[in-house]
Image: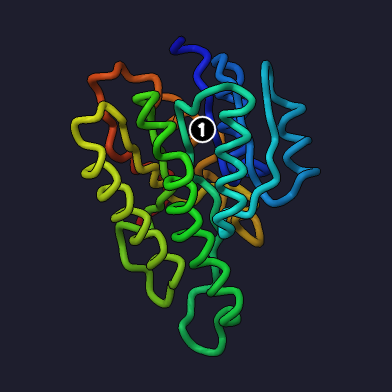
């Protein structure tokens, strides 16, 4: 049924992922929530309604992604919607003033390879269900941000969404890139300026995309706060 789809969300322990989990549960979806921090996942699950499974997952691990997909199938028998949302950022500099090479490596693996692993692990199930993939990109994946390797990772995710949709063309599976501007979430080290987006704004955009009729494939939702110039 359209109101009880099996909805897998990575990066579900905070921010956009957590807000989307709550909204999806209110809409009647059965949830499979994934993130690295089990305690935080349990807290989010406690705020959700209906059936929820939590699966501690490091998306940079292929085996963890396989386990996530198996847990969803084992609990609910199908996977209808996958929101590959896990990710984090870095300081803007390619110089030694920027983040450490180790931080860069973990960010690239999480933002790019992690999203690809999640898609691959769930690909057959979503295709069988004629389901929906959503990937978290960014405004930074549309504009080259000076000194930002994070921006480069989101350009990669933007291309990944296009490549995924091209592969699935004719299958009925839909693919949506969610590209937020500045959002007031734990993604930032400190709270940004007033009047930026709230995590709820992006969760509502996700829910709108998946609620369109099957003939409508919303390929990209680019959302900026009104005050954001770039």
Q: Is residue 204 above or below residue 123?
A: above
Q: Looking at the image, which is closer to me, 127 or 140? A: 127
Q: Is residue 201 above or below residue 61?
A: above
- How crowded pointer 1 is (Cα within 10 Å; few <14, some 14-19, many 20+) is rated as many
The residue under the point 67% across, 16% down is: 50
Q: Quadrant of residue 155?
A: bottom left
Relative to 134, 90 lies left or right:
right
Relative to 20, 49 lies left or right:
right
Q: Is residue 14 above or below residue 132?
A: below
Residue on which disc 1 sits:
203
The residue under the point 54% across, 74% down is: 104
**Residue 131, image x, y percentages:** 38, 27
The residue under the point 43% across, 50% down is: 181
Where the C terminus falls, by quadrant? Answer: bottom left
**Residue 4, image x, y percentages:** 52, 14
The residue under the point 28% across, 32% down is: 218
């Amino acid at each position: 049924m359209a109101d009880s789809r099996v909805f897998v969300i990575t990066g579900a322990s905070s921010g956009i992922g957590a807000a989307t989990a709550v909204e999806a549960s209110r809409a009647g979806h059965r949830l499979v929530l994934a993130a690295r921090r089990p305690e935080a996942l349990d807290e989010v699950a406690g705020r959700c309604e209906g059936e929820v499974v939590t699966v501690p997952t490091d998306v940079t691990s292929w085996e963890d992604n396989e386990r996530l997909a198996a847990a969803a199938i084992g609990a609910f028998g199908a996977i209808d919607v996958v929101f590959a949302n896990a990710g984090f950022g870095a300081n803007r500099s390619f110089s030694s003033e920027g983040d450490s090479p180790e931080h860069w490596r973990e960010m690239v693996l999480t933002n790019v390879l992690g999203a690809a692993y999640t898609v691959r692990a769930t690909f057959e199930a979503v295709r069988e269900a004629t389901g929906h993939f959503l990937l978290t990109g960014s405004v930074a994946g549309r504009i080259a941000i000076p000194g930002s390797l994070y921006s480069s990772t989101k350009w990669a995710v933007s291309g990944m969404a296009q490549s995924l949709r091209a592969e699935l063309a004719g299958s009925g599976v839909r693919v949506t890139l969610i590209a937020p501007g500045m959002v007031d979430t734990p993604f930032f080290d400190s709270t940004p300026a007033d009047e930026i987006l709230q995590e709820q704004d992006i969760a509502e955009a996700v829910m709108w995309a998946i609620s369109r009729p099957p003939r409508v494939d919303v390929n990209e939702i680019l959302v900026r706060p009104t005050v954001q110039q770039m």
